[in-house]
Every structure is written in structure tokens, then in C-alpha cells.
């Protein structure tokens, strides 16, 4: 694959040109429909067994953002971005699988007789495995956030994932459930001047082993 090949592929070009945004236009807004569309795209990301164990809280009013800001190091982007998402992973729970797979069966994608076996395999992986359940919550939330990051860039918006927050305080302030983990914050919105381009990455030879 050559540089010329990547430049004519819009998906690859989007990935390679994405950058993290520190500076947002504080006067800009996104409509609720635009926010819903970003989350719809985010939830097309893969999840283990199709558990879809994620949730998103979109803070788009100054009042809502002000609840988050002091428990997230008062980072300016939280208030300035058009929307700040709290990206939540839910502990992997195999008992939810029949409900999650019902639309898959209805759509004719998966035979109904396969559902119990899928649930059995999910239970063998996650039941009584709290660390694995939490790991899956973090993986799921990260996949969803990544899809939203690239979707935002494709739509001409800036975005930045952020881990600078008090997780326990976020849990209390926004009423998260016992099975929910705030994985990251994700700011999204039109940018203002001053953002750097994507930083150079390590050479592939330093991070890849071919066996």
C-alpha cells in the first residue's frame, strides 16, 4: 500500500489526519439530532457477544458541564466543547445476551437455536470473573468512543478523549449504576484556531513483530 493509495481512501485518510483538539469554539453548538447520530455511529463498534454494554451521557448545556468541570480538573475543553460525553462501560453480564440477540434473530442474521449456546459461552467467560467483566466494560467503552472520534473528524468536528477526572465523583454526581464504569470523557465540537496536527507516531518496526 502506498501513500497515494491511502489518500484516495476516505476512511484511511480520516484516521491518519485525525488530531486531538484542545481548543473549541465556545459559541458553537450541536443539535440533539447531531449528538444522537454520533452515538448511533459509536454504537456500531464491536462488542463481545454483541453485549453492547455501554452508555453515554451527553453534557451539552453550560449547567450540565459545570457539574462535571470541578471533578475533572476544570479542564477548559469541558466547558468550551459543544458537547462533552461521559463514556460509560457496563460490566459484562451474560444474562443480558438473549435480549441483545433478539433483534439479531428477528433480522434473520442468527438462528434462534444458537442463542442459548452463545449465552452459555458468555457465562463461562464472564460469570464470577469481576476483573474480566470490568476489562470488557473498558474495552467496550473504548471501541465506542473511538468510532465517535473518527465520525466526528469525518464530519469536520474536533474531539479529544480525556481521562483527567475523579471517577468516584463522576459516578456519584451523575448517578451511575453499580455495574457502570466511567471509562473516559470525550469532548466534541467545532474547533477554533490553535490546535496542533496529529503528532508523529513511533515507527512500525518498533511496535510490530512479524512471526
Image (cartoon, rainbow, N blue to C red):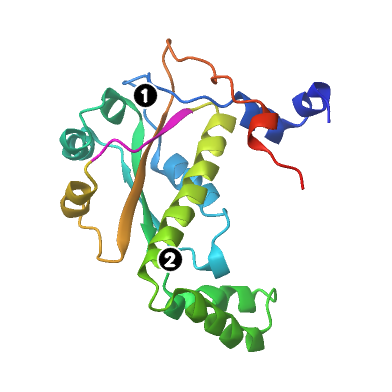
Measured Cα–Cα span from mark 1 to mark 2:
40 Å
Q: To which quarter of the image does residue 102 belong?
A: bottom right
Q: Residue furthest top?
A: 194
Q: Are marks 1 and 2 in contact (CB under 8 Å)?
A: no
Mark number displayed over residue 174: none
Residue at the image position 29 percent from the left and 35 percent from the top: 164
Write the start and end of the magenta stretch as one range.
158-165
Question: In terms of depth relative to the viewer, which is nearer, 179 or 65?
Answer: 179
**Left or right relative to 17: residue 1:** right
Q: Secondary structure at mark 1?
A: loop
At 37% from the left and 19% from the top, the residue drawn is: 25
Q: Assign the magenta stretch its main secondary structure.
A: strand
Question: In which image quadrant can residue 202 be found?
Answer: top right
Asked if the stretch drawn in magenta spans residue 169, the answer is no
Please tell me which residue is depicted at 42% across the width and 54% down the height of the picture: 138
Residue denoted by label 2:
132
Judged left or right of residue 135, residue 168 is left
What percent of the width, then of the height, locates residue 53?
44, 63
Q: Which mark is residue 28?
A: 1
Q: Position of residue 116 (x, y in %)?
A: 57, 87
Residue 161 located within the stretch drawn in magenta: yes
Q: Secondary structure at mark 2?
A: helix
For label 2, count other residues whose C-alpha is less than 10 Å away and answer few (under 14), some (14-19) or many (20+). Answer: some
Q: Nearer the viewer, residue 66 or 17?
A: 17
Specify the quadrant that holds the N terminus: top right
Amino acid at each position: 500500500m502506498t501513500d497515494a493509495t491511502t489518500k484516495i481512501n476516505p476512511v484511511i485518510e480520516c484516521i491518519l489526519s485525525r488530531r486531538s483538539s484542545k481548543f473549541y469554539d465556545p459559541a458553537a453548538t450541536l443539535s440533539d439530532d447531531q449528538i444522537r447520530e454520533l452515538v448511533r455511529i459509536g454504537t456500531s463498534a464491536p462488542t463481545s457477544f454483541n453485549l453492547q454494554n455501554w452508555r453515554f451521557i451527553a453534557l451539552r448545556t453550560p449547567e450540565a458541564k459545570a457539574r462535571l468541570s470541578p471533578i475533572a480538573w476544570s479542564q477548559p475543553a469541558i466547558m468550551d466543547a459543544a458537547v462533552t460525553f461521559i463514556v460509560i462501560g457496563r460490566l459484562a453480564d451474560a444474562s443480558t445476551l438473549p435480549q441483545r440477540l433478539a433483534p439479531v434473530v428477528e433480522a434473520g442474521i442468527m438462528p434462534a437455536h444458537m442463542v442459548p449456546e452463545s449465552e452459555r459461552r458468555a457465562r463461562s467467560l464472564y460469570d464470577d470473573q469481576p476483573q474480566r467483566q470490568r476489562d470488557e466494560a473498558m474495552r467496550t467503552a473504548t471501541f465506542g468512543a473511538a468510532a465517535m472520534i473518527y465520525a466526528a473528524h469525518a464530519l469536520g468536528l474536533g474531539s479529544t478523549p480525556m481521562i483527567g477526572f475523579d471517577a468516584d465523583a463522576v459516578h456519584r454526581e451523575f448517578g451511575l449504576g453499580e455495574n457502570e464504569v466511567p471509562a473516559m470523557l470525550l469532548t466534541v465540537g467545532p474547533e477554533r484556531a490553535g490546535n496542533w496536527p496529529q503528532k508523529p507516531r513511533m515507527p512500525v518496526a518498533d511496535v510490530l513483530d512479524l512471526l
